[in-house]
Image (cartoon, grey):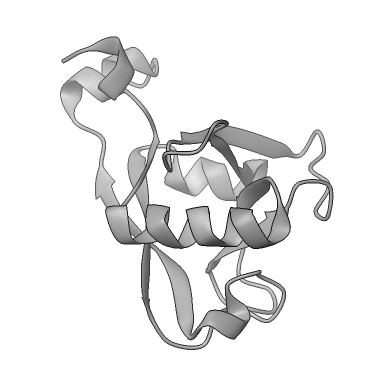
Amino acid sequence: MSEQTLSRVAVSEDAATLLRTLTAQHGPLMIHQSGGCCDGSSPMCYPVGMFLTGPGDVKLGDLDAGLDDPIEMFMSESQFEYWKYTHLTVDVVPGRGAGFSVEGPTGMRFLIRSRMLDDAELAHFGLAP
């Protein structure tokens, strides 16, 4: 497995297409995996600078949506403790987007698909037993 494939996050082609469209409309974007407050556990997509991360947030990685710059993805540190053994893929499905997330008016909504990290990924992230 190459170093490049060892990531905590990925993006589906459908989600990457929507992210490219949204970037053309709103400029550079970032994603924060919601902790379940107002919009459940949806990944929330914001123009860079509209959602401020802090010391209590963990950068999960960069999403390669085929843009000049990757889209950074974050999660709260407390939530990360529950998710640190999983790989997350940002995907998109028809439906009403989260109220504060930029995909809201598109008729699509982002969601997370997850799987457990495999042995190579666990070792890479220092989580091997």
Quadrant including the C terminus = top left
Say whether residue 129 is visible: no
Left or right: 51 as drawn, with respect to 98: right
Kindly identify the residue that appears in the image at 40 percent across and 52 percent down. 16
Q: Is residue 43 left or right of residue 55?
A: left
In the displayed structure, 96 sits above or below 23; it is below
Residue at 36% across / 21% down in the picture? 127
Q: Is residue 125 above or below residue 72?
A: above
- Please state if 90 lies on the left or on the right of 54 as rendered: left
Residue at (19%, 30%) from the top-left corner?
118
Residue 92: tell me if it is visible: yes
- Residue 34 placement (x, y as % from top left): 61, 62
Residue 124: image x %, image y %? 33, 14
Is 49 on the left-hand or right-hand side of 23? right
Q: Position of residue 98 (x, y in %)?
A: 60, 78
Q: Nearer the viewer, residue 87 or 109?
A: 109
